[in-house]
Amino acid sequence: MRLLSLFAGIGGIELGLERAGMTTVGQVELDPWCRTVLAKHWPAVPQHDDVVTAPEWWASTERPTVDLICGGFPCQPFSLAGKQLGINDHRWLWPATAAVIRTVRPRYVLLENVSALVRDSWAFGTVLGDLHTLGFDAEWATLRASDFGAPHNRERVYIVAYPQGEHGQTRDRMDAGGERGSPLTTRGLSGLAVHQRREQASAWLAREPRVDRLADGIPSQVERLHAAGNAVVPQVAEHIGKQIMEHARSAT
């Protein structure tokens, strides 16, 4: 399964999805330092710097078929640390994201954002409505990095969109473990006992001694706070990626 990553940052989501068996075929990232990191770890993968012009960039030459578009459009319009201007914030880049999806036509879409996005009914409704117009059904769940062994919570909402009519799940079923085919089941990980979480967190820190202040699952050489702090925890992306891969196999 081939993926195109938007708002790629330092590649946290790609790391996780590739562990799940996917292949990165394109990356879009504005920050020059992050693009340097991406070029080091994905030297053969084409890069672009602006999601707004990404549709033209992708269509400018022959490209491989993209099975999944992933990305976390800027969270500042919804973050509790900001002014929460929502769609009135100039960093509201979902319309640009939707334009890439419309051009590339992937089979799946994986979106990540702060959990406060769900509480902004206008913005969240716009995302779901646009996905429906583009031919997708969508499921979402709020997952915490601590559910996957991290020593911090990092609660984020993850939205998986797939072709309309394929294995639709109710949100309650999805959160509870769901039926076969649901891309976002936590499969009991959210039920880890406190002592189990502490044990996993200690093991996590032991593997990443140089980033113990962050412990986001990102390689220890990547230490810029703004980049690592914004990165998707690869272990979470890997879990969701495996669910998507399973869904794709069951749908064929």
Image (cartoon, rainbow, N blue to C red):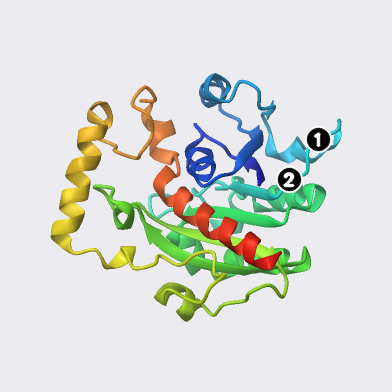
Q: Amino acid at mark 1?
A: Arg
Q: Is residue 246 left or right of residue 157?
A: right
- Quarter placement of the C terminus: bottom right
On the image, the x and y values in percent for residue 94 come to 65, 52
Above or below, 29 relative to 234: above
Does the CB distance between marks 2 and 1 fall below 8 Å? yes
Snapshot quadrant of residue 160: bottom right
At a point 43% along the width and 64% down the height, the residue shown is 142
Q: Is residue 213 left or right of residue 122?
A: left
Q: Is residue 127 visible?
A: no
Disc 1 is placed on an element classified as loop
Snapshot quadrant of residue 195: bottom left
Q: Nearer the viewer, residue 31 or 149?
A: 149
Disc 2 is placed on an element classified as loop
Q: Nearer the viewer, residue 83 or 171?
A: 171
Query: How dense is the environment of label 1, judged by Cα within 10 Å: few (below 14), some, or many (20 and up)?
Result: few
The residue most toward the left is: 195
- Residue placed under numbered mark 1 in the picture: 63
Q: Is residue 33 left or right of residue 122?
A: left
On the image, the x and y values in percent for residue 235 come to 40, 47
